[in-house]
Amino acid sequence: MASLARNLTVLASLAAATLAITSQARAQESEATYFQGKTVRLVVGYGPGGGYDIYARTIAPYIAKNLGANVVVENQPGAGGLTALNRVYAAVPDGLLMMIVNGTGAALAQLSDAQGARFDIGKVGHLGTVSASPWVWLVAPNSPIKTPDDAVKSASNRMMWSGSGPMDGLSDGAAFTCEALKLNCRIVIGYPGSNEAALAVSRGEMDSIYVSDTSANNYVKAGQNRAVATMGRDKSRFFPNVPTIFEALKLDAEQTWLFDFRATVENLGRILIAPPNLPPARLAYMQEAVRKALNDPVLVAEGEKTQRYIDYVDANATRDATLKAVTNLTPEQRKKVVQLLTVAEQK
């Protein structure tokens, strides 16, 4: 009898597992049918030509292949990506809209209760991380600033930093740098994206820009900018001979915290999201399509060839990292962050 009971239990478990697998397969098949022939918009919160735009146009065909839908890239510049993110957050959750988001800027906007931020980055439909990379301090090729120490020694001189929005990575990264090093800075926003902001530095209109190393690599290779330091503890793969800010200067405890916190938030990288409240089966289907797309050997090789590397992180880990970034501050630290995110000026 005991043997019979065990056998029946095993059979029941197998039947339940088979039913679950069958149900999941049917759900995936249903979602595949839903996307067939439809068009999905992949929103970029910046103008054409910048790093986010290039990444979006690179990955769009691979996502399309795995979704079974057309994927078109749509640029919606404004407020450093926040305007587009607000629209996506409020959009109908039908699976036909996704966005490549500056995770750093989104998290900082939420932390500071920014006036232009009407979203909760923890509640979006997380699809995964495309890439995350260190950020770099750039100047013009003929700038007298060769090292961070040069900037510190000339701290009485006004230094102009270019950005696109109040919390776009460029402007808030500049704010953290200026505060930590006690520089006399003016941070000017209003450039459509990092491409135009970097050109402003090369033209002498601005003095410095704080930008991701993938974008910095293109600007430096083009001869329009020069790297001063990598702004975290990890060296950039593009600039192995450029020191990190921790190597370039002896930092006190407050400076160390500012740069370490900044690097933690920067590690959120370029994340893919959909509007909140997607049907679970549809969200799961999109997450799986993104996973397959960003692990496609052809795409990975293309990224290596163009030096727009794909550093995929799955949807659950992306969500967890985002939640940690926006909840792991003391009240005093959060107050400090908020103060730093309100210093940019419109050009």
Image: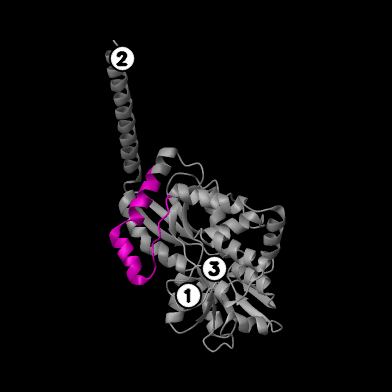
- Pick the front one: 212 or 154: 154
- Judge whether residue 82 can be spotted in this image: no
At 56% from the left edge and 49% from the top edge, which residue is drawn? 323
**Percent x, y for residue 35?**
35, 46
Mark 1–mark 3 distance (CA, rounded to whole Å): 15 Å
Q: In this view, does 276 lie above or below 173?
A: above
Instruction: Specify the amino acid type for callout 3.
Output: Gly
Give residue 107's quadrant in the image: bottom right
Q: Which residue lies furthest to the top in this view?
A: 1
Region in magenta: 285-314
| Residue sitting at x 41%, y 64% | 55
User: Residue tagged by mark 2?
Assistant: 5
Q: Does the magenta stretch include residue 141?
A: no
Tell me where residue 49 appears, x and y as whole percent: 45, 71
Inspect the image, locate mark 2, and give the three-letter code of the amino acid beneath it. Ala
Residue 293 seen in render: yes
Q: Where is residue 56 in the image (x, y as percent from the top left)?
A: 41, 62
Residue labelled with disc 1: 216
